[in-house]
Amino acid sequence: MPPGYRFYPTEEELISFYLHNKLEGEGEYLNRVIPVVDIYDYNPSQLPQISGEASLRDTEQWFFFIPRQESEARGGRPKRLTTTGYWKATGSPNHVYSSDNRIIGVKRTMVFYSGRAPNGAKTDWKMNEYKAIKAEASSSNNEVPKLRQEFSLCRVYKKSKCLRAFDRRPAPRRDVVSYPRVEDADHNNNLHKVVARSGTSSAESSSSGDHGQPSHGEEANQMDVDNEATLLDWEKVDWFLGSEP
C-alpha cells in the first residue's frame, strides 16, 4: 500500500464484514487480506512472516482466520499448545457491539506463555480471538449468544511499552546547531571579564614590579577593557535574540 495507509480495521468491521463473509463462503480475496492459518502450529514470532498482504509489512499487529479444530467439533476444548509454549485465556469473554448497540460477536483475550504449564513464563505476545454469533442478539438479552464455530478471527500483537507507530516521532537530528542560552552568554561574559582583569593585573605587576594598588592610568585602562567586554556581551545577546546589532 502507499505510504501512510495501514490496515487498521475496527472490531465491528472485523466481525461484520471479514468474519461474516468468510463464514458465508463469500469473497475469496479475503484470504489474501487475512489468511487461514492454524496459529497453534506456529510460535508467535513466526506469525508476522505468514500474515496477509494487508498486514505483512505491519510491525505491530497481524490478522488470521483460524479454522475450527477437530477436538472442538467433537465437543472438546481447543488445544492451544505450540512447540515452545502455549496460549492461555485471560479474563472472561466480552461481547462485541455494533455502532447501533447490537451484539455481533464475542471476544476473548489470550496471552502467550513460553514453556509448559504450570511453570510457563509470561511473554509480551497477546491475541484477541473473535467469534461471530449465529443470530442477532439484543444488548439487553442476558442469554449467552450461540456462536458460529467454523472459523474464528484473531488479532495477534505484541504488547509494547512505547507508542504506536503513527504516534511516534523521529529522533532529533544530531547536526542541528544548538544556540547558547542567555544564561550561558552571561556566564561566558562574566568569565571574559575575569580573564581580562586577570590579564591586566598580571601586565601591571610585571611592568611596575609593584604589588600594591594600580595607578590612575592603569585604572583607566581597566575601565576600557571592562567597557569593551560589556559591549561584546550585548552583541552576543542581540545575536541570540535575533535583533540587529
Image (cartoon, grey):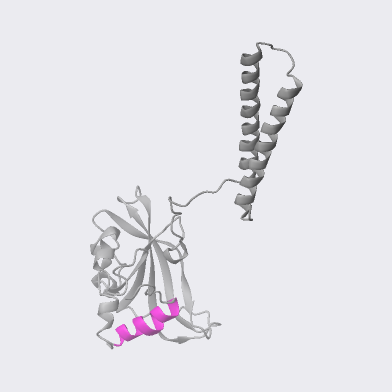
Residue 70 x/y as whole percent: 24, 72
Q: Which residues are magenta?
A: 11-24
Q: Quadrant of residue 221?
A: top right
Residue 14 x/y as whole percent: 39, 78
Rendered view: 116 above or below 140:
above
Q: Is residue 198 visible?
A: yes
Residue 234 x/y as whole percent: 66, 45
Q: Residue furthest front?
A: 217
Rendered view: 56 above or below 159:
below
Viewer-proximal residue among 142 and 97:
97
Main secondary structure along the magenta-highlighted residues: helix
Viewer-proximal residue among 8 and 157:
8
| Residue at horizontal 28 percent and vertical 69 percent from the top | 56
| Residue at horizontal 26 percent and vertical 84 percent from the top | 29
Residue 12 lies in the magenta-colored region: yes
Q: Is residue 146 visible?
A: no
With 157 as the anchor, is 163 left or right in this view? right
With 163 as the anchor, is 221 left or right in this view? right
